[in-house]
Image (spheres, rainbow, N blue to C red):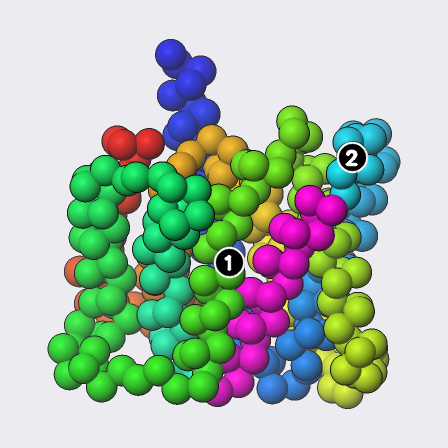
Amino acid sequence: MISSLNIKVKSHLVMLLFSLFVAGSFVFGKLYAELIEPELLTFYRFLLGAVILGSYLIFSKRLSSDLIFKPWRYFILGGIYSIYFVFMFIALRYTSTISTSAIFALMPFATLILDSLIFNKKSHFLIWLALCISSLGALYIIFDGSLSNALNFRLDFGELIFLIGTIVYSSYALVQPRLNFGENILTTTFGVLIAGTVILSFFIIVQDINFIPKNTSIGLISLVIYLAIFASIGTIVCLNFASSRLPGTNVMAYSLLIPFWVLMVESTTKESLAPSYTYIGIIPIGLGLLMLYRNS
């Protein structure tokens, strides 16, 4: 009983980290979205992530032979990640981090709907209620606590591109448990990073994109390092760990925390306090997540 409780708590805690890592990629990715092609940025984050994690696994002798068992699985998972991140960086060229956060807040509902349509899983009323409560808090933060801002929200090109990426990404928590055959989390993560690197290199070659970025700077290099370690290795490890232990909807519900983290990270970089509506919105988000925790 204690052991299963600890696993449950750990699963929810790693998804808290997941939401923070993703928020960082929104904030920092926006700064350099126009300086490098999205496919190239995603390629280098996956490549560096694979090199770092692969080196650790080799030198610690933890690289499992399970990696070569049905490798097509990693290409499915890596493809999901590749599509999402490429679409995210394309979207950030045309829209704001707040708009992308608003779209990202739809992910738990997309997961719930896909789970019902594809896997014929029925979700309890309390799950829907918890998601609605959390979503209200997320949207309150996203639209600055203003109803007029919410009414003026439009789906332009950037938002539509990111919506497609978000729907694809929402399937990860549903697909991953069905493609896992007992491999350890780091081996799975390494496989996903390698597959993502191969997929993206193919698209870069087809589109005749130069593998050497036109613009390089300390800031851009720092961004790639952050994305590789935290937003690639970190998020994939978190997702793989939690997806194998929690329902997909509960896992993706933590995306509702991202608008909160975005404003907190931005306020830190600007050395100022986050707006008051940030702290009001976190209350219903926390309440909804608590309801999901009790039903997980």
The furthest residue to the left: 147
Indicate left or right for 13 with 77 as reference: left
Which corner quadrant holds the N terminus? top left
Q: Could you tell me what secondary structure mostly forms the magenta stretch?
A: helix
Q: Is residue 20 magenta?
A: no
Residue 255 appears anywhere in the view: yes
Give amino acid for label 2: Phe
* Corner quadrant of residue 274: bottom left
Dot 1, how many residues are within 10 Å of its Cα: few (below 14), some (14-19), or many (20+)? many
Q: What stretch is highlighted in magenta?
A: 72-94
Q: Residue at x 20, y 54 (%)?
A: 132
Q: Does residue 20 sit above or below 244 in this rendering?
A: below
* Corner quadrant of residue 139: bottom left
The image shows residue 140 at horizontal and vertical percentages of: 20, 67
Q: Distance between the residues labelled 1 and 2?
A: 24 Å
Q: Does residue 289 sit above or below 63 in this rendering?
A: below
Closer to the camera in the image, 90 or 50? 90
The image shows residue 265 at horizontal and vertical percentages of: 42, 65
**Which label was assigned to residue 69?**
2
The furthest residue to the top: 1
Closer to the camera in the image, 71 or 62? 71
The image shows residue 214 at horizontal and vertical percentages of: 77, 87
Q: Residue at x 53, y 50 (%)?
A: 172
* Corner quadrant of residue 268: bottom left
**Which label was assigned to residue 169?**
1
Provide the secondary structure element on which disc 2 rests: loop
Dot 2, how many residues are within 10 Å of its Cα: few (below 14), some (14-19), or many (20+)? few
Closer to the camera in the image, 131 or 5? 131
Q: Residue at x 38, y 21 (%)?
A: 5
Give amino acid for label 1: Tyr
Q: Residue at x 25, y 50 (%)?
A: 131
Indicate left or right for 273 with 16 as reference: left
